[in-house]
Image (cartoon, rainbow, N blue to C red):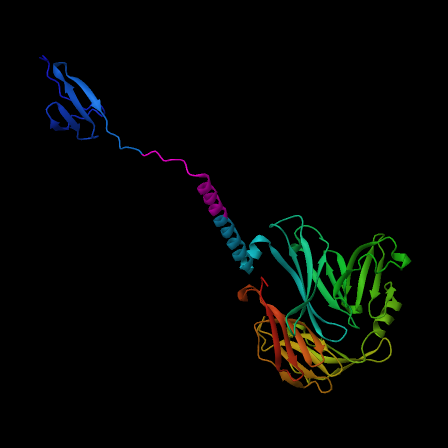
Amino acid sequence: MAKTLRPIRCPQCGSPTKIILRPDLFCCDACQTEYYLDSDDVTVHVQHHYPPTSVLAPPEPTAVRYWVASIFLLTAIGALTWLYVSSLRQPNQAEQVISRPVFYLTRYLYADARQQPVYVILRTEGPRWGSDSTTWTAVFLEPRTGQVRREQELLPLGRHPDNHSYSWHTFPGGRVYLLGNQRLYRIENNPDRLLDVTDTLLARFPPASSGVAQVEFEPSYEALRFLTNDGQTFFYLPASGHVLSQGEDLYRAAYANLPPRFFTFEWPEGVGRDARWPLLLANRPTTYPTVAFENLTQNRRFFEPHILCQDANAVLITVAPTAKPDGPDVVQCLDVKTGHQRWSRPPSSYTFREAVRTPDGFALAYSTGSEQDYVHGVVLLSDDGKELYDFQRKRLK
């Protein structure tokens, strides 16, 4: 007989709790292991019961082939379905902007050889923000339909082009030039394109053979002012093609390019410029250097006036409705013979800076700032001021 009493514990997990199945046969209450005692020496015998496992026979060769073929067929159907759905899905505009940053640098409205309005936008695209390599694209748009007339890819002009300044000017005769990043471009038709003429415009002028150091617009002479690499200054007049130095010949050539009748805003004698009501005057070139002035507005007050376009029949202007600084723009058309107002549009939150005469009226380019998400576009008006069509775009378009 055993002389020492000890608790019987499960030999598998050590738990003392158990269920008595029959004398000397126990089942562990914790891990379900069955064990029994062998006589007086208290030898514990462990017996595990495992669920029987069935031995599967290897599949027949024909069944294996059918099984592999089924998997291949299902995979092929899934791949074809994915390709079909992907081909139908069009990337939205936000995805395009995120994957390829776009900078809109400048835009301008001009008239082509048929006097139809053309809206050109210059943009850059790069693989990432601050990239050294960007693609410049000039997009020529048809405001009447919103269709793209042509896209022209330009050579990169340097890093961070959005920090550069750009200016446009339409010279007498309709020649349009763009100045940007010290490069000079001329707009050509058929096809629409920007032609870099920085180094070629004065190529046949021997005094400028040293090359161009700087080029600027000179509105007072309706000319382009060139500074050559050797320090000489010359003026190119697009209306006549003359290349002249400062002096009497330049003044006479500029005078000869004046239209028979044109308009400008001037302050009358004895009235300070802070009075904010310049008068619209008609200039009538007579014999050089005399210019006759005629007051057509009978001392009407104009606030923040700006001439948009003019021809022999009408002059289009923008003015502020009151003397309040930075007021809204009001577009008006004045009669060239009497100076009387032919029509006026309501005050607008848009800013109008250029316009062109069209066969059926006028085309006006407009834009606004961040308060209206940089909206811009072209509005087409009839000859009596009625709106025909509004071609509008936003910052990301």
The residue under the point 80% across, 68% down is 221
Q: In which quarter of the image is residue 40?
A: top left
Nearest to the observer: residue 314 or residue 296: 314
- 392 sits left or right of 296 in the view: left
Quarter-wise, where is residue 24 in the image?
Answer: top left
Does the rendering let one see residue 74? yes
**Residue 367 seen by the camera:** no
Horizontally, residue 212 falls left or right of residue 24, namely right
Magenta span dominant secondary structure? helix
Location of residue 68 in the rendering, given as x and y in whole percent from the top left corner: 48, 43
| Residue 281 on image: x %, y % | 73, 80
In the picture, the quarter occupied by the N terminus is: top left
Residue closest to the eye, 88 or 251: 88
Residue 215: where, in percent of width, then height?
A: 78, 59
Q: What stretch is highlighted in magenta?
A: 54-72
Locate the C terminus and report the quarter of the image it occupies: bottom right
Identity of the residue drawn at 77% across and 61% down:
195
Tally of numbered tags: 0
In this rendering, would 15 be left or right of 23? right
Which corner quadrant of the image does residue 106 belong to? bottom right
